[in-house]
Image: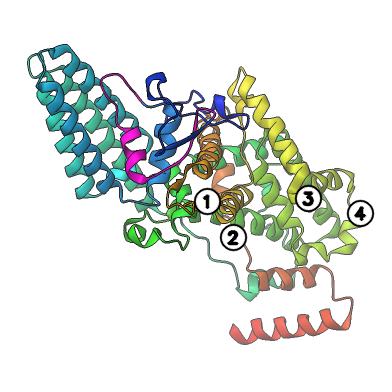
Amino acid sequence: MPQTPIFSSMLGSSCSGQVQPDMGERCVDPVYQDGNLVSGSLEALIERLVPTMDYYPDRTYIFTFLLSSRVFIHPHELLAKVGQICIKQKQQLETGTEAEKLKSFAAKIIQLLKEWTETFPYDFQDEKSMKELKEIAHRITQCDEENGTVKKIISQMTQNLLMALSARSQYQEIGEKFRQPVTDKGTILKTKPQSTQKDILSVCCDPLILAQQLTYIELERVSNIYPEDLMQIVSHMDSLDNHKCRGDVTKTYNLEAYDNWFNCLSMLVATEICRVVKKKQRTRMVEFFIDVARECFNIGNFNSMMAIISGMNLSPVARLKKTWSKVKTAKFDVLEHHMDPSSNFCNYRTALQGAAQRSQTANSNREKIVIPVFNLFIKDIYFLHKIHTNRLPNGQINFKKFWEISRQIHDFLIWKQVECPFEKDKKIQSYLLTAPIYSEEALFIASFESEGPENHMEKDSWKTLRTTLLNRA
């Protein structure tokens, strides 16, 4: 996916994808409003995708249609239809005597395939799609058999595609090593001060450095999320069209792995706090994570910031009143203000918009970092899907809906391409990714060990948990 913005003309209420002047707005299918494509039949939209001798689709249209088409048609079926249109146009040009026109047409088709394979490589994961791609490539190669330029370009494109597919396959094979929550009674029940126990502060005591390492991890994980992964939020929903493509939909591994990272970070924060024996050290740990979250906010890493705040707001941590009474909470109050869920997280969205604007004019990768709260980002796409139908009453595809969804996904793709400006610290990252985390049950036990139950309900919970743990052991 090119890093240059392709949705600059969509910052307002308008949409890109305007037709060429000679195509006008007189067509009933597809439908335009103020020069912007808003709806059309699947067949008309596919025709709009395929270049002609005098026309090449707008980049925003290519991205939006290829992204949204999987809701209505398999990628290999779409490739087959594109191939059929290409053959017809090629045959028409061959009846003429101008060979240069045929070469120009071939170049445009190659450009379309290049954009497709680079932006949505996983569309070509199955044999059917690769077969259709090779078939189109073979037809186009015949347009310039003299010097072999087209053949060389297609060969390079295919090689790059196979490399991209291989890289993604390797990432999925490595898999996310899910950390199993600690439940061992000797680890959780603090019968003796654990002075030699390793904690995050023994690995990194600088909030800024830890925030930078968290950002490194975030960017590394988010780089493995692809637009077609995000589109599954729509294509997995129940609609009249989804039964056609649900069987071949890409697995949601990357989304699940990233979501798991958020949960692990939240639980790690809670574990680090709850397992500390002495109140003074526990207070220091709480204040340390507050500072880390603050540094994440300053960097533009809102996902790690939210994960840290979520961990500190878990009941086992929130109930430690004696600890919190010693914490200077002014900074934490500011963070919670930014993440206030009221008015649909209005404060967070304002901060996110500020970070996005900073990113657009930034001169350094450090200033370009924008890592949104992923869970909220997903919910926004889901909400757009739910409030707008895929098809209009006349049966045409509601393309205006997909303009907005693709705009949001494209923003995310631009943000994820930022090269991390921070050097990797293997020691710190190893701890963040492999340190033991407690289950919710274990967190409560550790919390009660740190500060005893304060009411009958907590006392009953504590007895039940302790008995359960001892019996299990």
From what the image shows, is residue 273 above or below residue 124?
Answer: below
Q: Within the magenta stretch, is there residue 187?
A: no
Highlighted range, magenta: 34-56
Query: Residue 203, can we see it?
Result: no
Q: Are marks 3 and 4 in contact (CB under 8 Å)?
A: no
Instruction: Identify the residue under disc 2.
Output: 436
Residue placed furthest toward the left: 146
Instruction: Identify the residue under disc 4.
Output: 326
Nearest the viewer among 186 and 235 is: 235
Residue at the spot 76% in from the left edge and 44% down from the top edge: 346
Instruction: Identify the residue under disc 3.
Output: 343
Nearest the viewer among 143 and 348 is: 143
**Dot 4 amino acid type:** Lys
* Colour scheme shown: rainbow
Mark closer to the chain start, 2 or 4: 4
SS for callout 4: loop
Instruction: Identify the residue under disc 1.
Output: 258
Q: Within the magenta stretch, is there residue 53?
A: yes
**Dot 1 amino acid type:** Tyr
Which is in the foreground here, disc 3 or disc 4?
3
* Image coords of residue 265 (percent x, y): 63, 53
